[in-house]
Image (cartoon, helix red, strand yellow):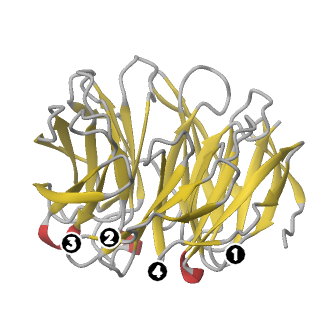
């Protein structure tokens, strides 16, 4: 059953309507996409403590229904979600990194909002100690999506090659900085047409950029990223046409490591190098866990939203060409975890979707 309520938040001239929807236990990662091909943005929530994913189908007018059969089994403790068409049938599928397990789970979509396990899922990966993050791209340019996850304990990531049947084999390992924990993402940072990778290196206070050569190989570059970098998102944060990085530093949820929680922004030069935005790290709540980018105020510049796991609010940063123009806090509940930015209601304004883990719900902040 979906339970929801509307609230209203106004601060610094920015207005939001707030809707809360009950999902599974331990709501964690959240991602959005059109799962049933009706041109509306739907929501996928990984319920870590239920080992499931809730699919909320957007019916329009800010209303949602759970897809028939939802929640779907997503393997033990789904920690991160990746959305892509892994078997090339034109329908979006789901991939999960399963915390506390050495495997990845793939669910194939039917284009109507239902999902079932891929024939050979879950896919075992020899990582240490277990998987945390997951991404996909065609790293070797063979027309088939590959998947990549972290092996935190041995300072590396592992790539599995995909085929047209959504099978993943032939693991290859690539060195990173020390302890690439929790998040990794992919984009073309140097504009050569090949997919690159960024990892957050928890115990190196850095990120690793792995520049892809289009044949499945990578060259490695490290950049300073504050204290205990935990999560990362990609966007054009200063509107110069180059991809930048928003990184949350989270010593308070990483075993009490030294340093201060915050948001570090690295500006890309379009050639694969990055420099720290003046003013970084910016103040967040306690335990910033995940971060998302998107243009929230329609000025053409990507803004930043941060979930604070140990605070009862999310942090919003409105960006300009020279840095943070203003910031605000939005109340959410207990243990905010997953976060995403998209135009959920189709009104031309970007909205924020976040999870409140202890409250077992997803919260949508609709821009007014």
Instruction: Please indicate whether residue 28 sits to the left or right of residue 273 in the image.
Output: right
Q: Residue at label 4?
A: 76
Q: Nearer the viewer, mark 1 or mark 2?
A: 2
**Rendered image: mark on residue 360:** 1
Mark 4–mark 3 distance (CA, rounded to whole Å): 16 Å
Q: Quadrant of residue 41?
A: top right
What is the residue that sits farthest to the top in this orientation?
240
Counting residues from the start of the chain, the first of labels 2 and 4 encountered is: 4
Name the element at disc 3.
loop
Report the front residue among 251 and 93: 93
Q: Vertical placement of 125 versus 345: above or below?
A: below
Residue 127 got which mark? 3
Q: Earlier in the sequence, mark 1 or mark 2?
A: 2
Q: Secondary structure at mark 2?
A: loop
Residues tagged 1 and 2 counted as in contact (Cβ below 8 A):
no
Pointer 2 and pointer 3: residues touching (CB < 8 Å)?
yes
User: Which residue is labeled 2 in the image?
Assistant: 131
Classify 10 Å Cα crowding around label 3: few (below 14), some (14-19), many (20 and above): many
Between residues 115 and 240, which one lies in front from this camera angle? Answer: 115
């Amino acid at each position: 059953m979906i339970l929801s309520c509307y609230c209203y938040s106004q601060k610094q001239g920015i207005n939001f309507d707030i809707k809360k929807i009950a999902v599974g236990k331990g709501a964690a990662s959240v991602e959005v996409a059109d799962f049933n091909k009706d041109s509306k943005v739907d929501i996928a929530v990984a319920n870590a403590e239920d080992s499931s994913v809730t699919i909320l189908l957007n019916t329009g007018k800010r209303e949602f229904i759970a897809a028939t059969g939802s929640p779907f089994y997503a393997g033990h403790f789904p920690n991160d979600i990746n959305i892509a068409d892994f078997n090339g049938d034109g329908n979006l599928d789901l991939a999960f990194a399963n915390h506390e397990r050495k495997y990845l789970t793939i669910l194939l979509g039917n284009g109507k909002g239902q999902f079932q396990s891929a024939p050979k899922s879950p896919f075992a990966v020899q990582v240490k100690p277990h998987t945390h993050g997951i991404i996909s791209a065609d790293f070797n340019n063979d027309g088939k999506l590959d998947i990549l996850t972290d092996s935190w304990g041995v300072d590396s990531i592992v790539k599995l090659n995909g085929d047209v049947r959504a099978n993943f084999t032939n693991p290859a390992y690539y060195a990173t900085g020390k302890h690439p924990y929790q998040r990794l993402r992919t984009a073309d940072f140097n504009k050569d047409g090949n997919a690159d990778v960024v990892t957050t290196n928890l115990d190196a206070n850095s990120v690793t950029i792995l520049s892809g050569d289009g044949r499945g190989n990578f060259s490695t570059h490290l950049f300073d990223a504050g204290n205990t970098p935990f999560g990362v998102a990609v966007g054009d944060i200063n509107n110069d046409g180059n991809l930048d990085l928003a990184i949350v530093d989270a010593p308070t949820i990483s075993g009490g490591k030294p340093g201060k929680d915050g948001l570090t922004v690295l500006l890309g030069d379009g050639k694969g190098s990055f420099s720290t935005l003046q003013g970084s790290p910016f103040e967040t709540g306690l335990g910033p866990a995940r971060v998302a980018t998107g243009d929230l105020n329609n000025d053409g510049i990507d803004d930043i939203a941060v979930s604070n796991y140990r605070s009862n609010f999310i942090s919003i940063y409105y960006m300009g060409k020279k840095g943070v123009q203003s910031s605000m806090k939005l109340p959410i509940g207990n243990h905010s975890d997953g976060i995403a930015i998209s135009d959920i209601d189709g009104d031309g304004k970007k909205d924020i979707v976040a999870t409140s883990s202890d409250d077992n719900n997803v919260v949508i902040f609709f821009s007014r």
